[in-house]
Amino acid sequence: MPLYVCYCPDYSDNLETRLSVREAHLAAAAEDKKTGASVFGRAFLDDSVATKEAGKPADQLPGMAGSVMILRFPTIDEAWARIKADKYWTAGVWDKEKVVVREIIGAPVDDTIKIQ
């Protein structure tokens, strides 16, 4: 089944909204993980707080600037539908004009993500 990488940057200065709906977003992500629709998902950090030195973790919550996910769906339309159903989309956390969903392919040496 195809894999899709989803790049979902937040609107600027939107941390309060993100945190207010975070539990609903994480609950949906956990369900996606159970069904196999989600392969990977993480928040990404603003450059101003990203880890500068190995072994020193970033202050992750204040610096969240968006989400990146790898989703597994039969079609790109279904991947987009999942993104648009997410609480971060409906609550106005993600910048809808900047969200990108693209199909990705595996490589013969790829042993980190199994494409089935």
Image (cartoon, rainbow, N blue to C red):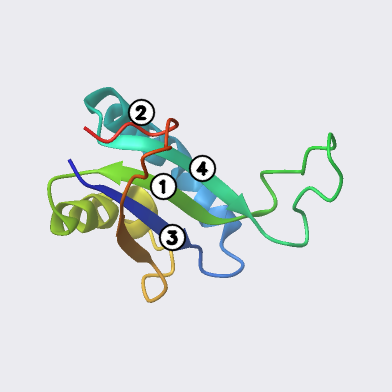
| Secondary element at image label 4 | strand
Residue found at x 18% / y 44%: 73
Residue 69 in the image, given as x and y percentages of width and height: 41, 47
Work out which quarter of the rendered image holds the C terminus and state it.
Answer: top left
- Residue bearing mark 2: 30
In this view of the protein, which residue sits in the foreground, 51 or 2?
2
**Residue at which label 1 appears:** 69
| Front residue of this view, candidates 109 and 70 | 109
- Label 1 sits on a secondary structure element that is strand
In the rendered structure, which disc, 1 or 3, sits on the residue that comes first in sequence?
3
Q: Residues within 10 Å of mark 4 (few under 14, many from 20)?
A: few
What distance separates the C-alpha of mark 1 from that of mark 4?
Answer: 6 Å
Q: Is residue 18 left or right of residue 83?
A: right
Q: Which mark is residue 42?
A: 4
Around disc 1, counting alpha carbons within 10 Å, would you say few (fewer than 14), some (14 to 19), or many (20 or more)?
some
Element on which disc 3 rests: strand
Above or below, 33 against 4 in this view is above
In this view, the mark in front (1 or 3):
1
Amino acid type at image mark 2: Ala
Q: Which residue is mark 3?
A: 8
